[in-house]
Amino acid sequence: MQEQRTHVRLTRTAVAIMLLCMAVWGIVSCAGATAPRRADDLRIALLCNTNPESPFGRLSPKVSATFDRIKKENPLFMVHLGNMIYGGHEWMGIKASDISGQFNEFFAASARAQTILYTTRGALDGFNDSPEPYILHSGRQNYYSFNYGNCHFIVLDTSDPEPCHVSEKQLQWLTLDLKRYRDCPAIFVIAHHPLLPPRAVRLAENGICADGGRVMALLSKYPVKAVISAGAAVNNNEYRDGVRHIIAGCGGFNKSDAMSRAYNYYMLEYAGGVVTVSGQRLDP
C-alpha cells in the first residue's frame, strides 16, 4: 500500500512538471510567434544607362571604371536598373550579332566588380521587341525574385510587352510571389521605369510605367520598404504612403549624354528599417 501511495505521488508530480513545462513552452512559443523579425542590414550598389551611344558602338571606358570603383565599395551585391546595351530592330540595320556583342562586352566589364550582379531589363535591352537576347545573356528571366538574408527582392519588367507596361501574366506572377513571401520583414521592388510620377522632378509621361498604379495597389498590402527604379538620368527620393520611392538614374557615360554631371552609380543602405541612398561620381 505504501509503495502504491508513493507511485501516485510520483505520478502526480510528473504530471505537474509536464504541465508546467508545457505552459512555459507555450509562453515562449507565443512570444516568438508574435515578436516581429528584424530585416537584415543591406549595402548594395545601383547603376543603369551604361549602354553605348549607338547599337554599333562600344561601351564607354567609364563603364569599366565604374565597376572598378564599385569593387572598392565592396557591396553585398549590385543591381543594374536597365539599359545595359543599345538594342532595337532589324529594320534599323541592327543584327543579332550586334546585340550579342554588346551584351558580351557589358558582362565582361561587370565582372570587374567581383560581386553578384542582378539585372533589370530596360527599354533598350531588347531586340525586335523580344526579351530573349536579354534572358540568354543575363541568365535571368525578364522578371524574377530573389532573397538576400531575410529580405525579399522583386525585379519587374516594365517593358512587357512594350516600354512602360506590365503584362497581365506578370501581374499574376507578382500576386503569387507577394503572397508567398508575405512574412518577409522587408520587401524591395526593382523596376526600370518609375511606377509613379515623382513629385519633385519632372519626367516625360512616356518615362513612367503606365501600369504602375495597378502594381502599387498590389504592393500596398505587403511590407514593401522601397521601390527602386531608373529611367532617365535623374536622382529622386520620396516617401509616399509608407514606401520609399527611389529613382537612381545614371548618366555621363557617353559624350553625347546631356546629363554629363549625373551620378555614375549609387550606394543604397538599409539599416534599422531606414533606407538611405547616396549618388557617386567617378570625377570629384
Image (cartoon, grey):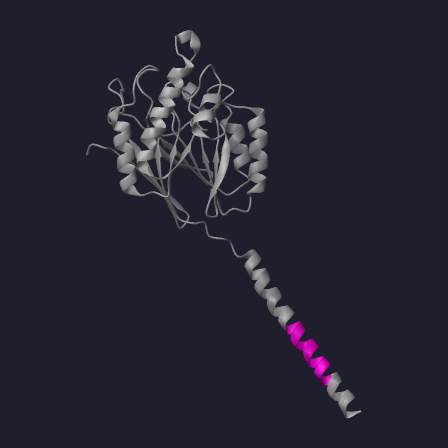
Q: State whether residue 128 appears in this view.
A: yes
* Residue 16 is covered by the magenta coloring: yes
Find the residue positioned furthest to the right: 1
Q: x%, y% of residue 200? A: 35, 30
Q: Main secondary structure of the magenta part?
A: helix
- First to last magenta residue range: 9-20
- Classify the position of the C terminus by image quarter: top left
Q: Nearer the viewer, residue 76 or 185?
A: 76
Q: Residue at x 40, y 50 (%)?
A: 272
Find the residue positioned furthest to the bottom: 2
Position of residue 244 relative to residue 253, above or below, is below
Q: Residue at x 39, y 11 (%)?
A: 94
Q: x%, y% of residue 80? A: 38, 31
Q: How many marks?
A: 0
* Residue 77 is covered by the magenta coloring: no
263 sits left or right of 91 in the view: left
- Classify the position of the N terminus by image quarter: bottom right
Q: x%, y% of residue 171? A: 56, 29
Q: Nearer the viewer, residue 280 or 204?
A: 280
Q: Residue at x 29, y 38 (%)?
A: 70
Q: Nearer the viewer, residue 203 or 91?
A: 91
Position of residue 142 relative to residue 97, above or below, is below
165 sits left or right of 80 in the view: right
Q: State whether residue 84 appears in this view.
A: no
Q: Residue at x 30, y 33 (%)?
A: 265
Q: x%, y% of residue 182? A: 55, 43
The image quarter in which residue 113 lies: top left
Find the residue positioned furthest to the left: 284
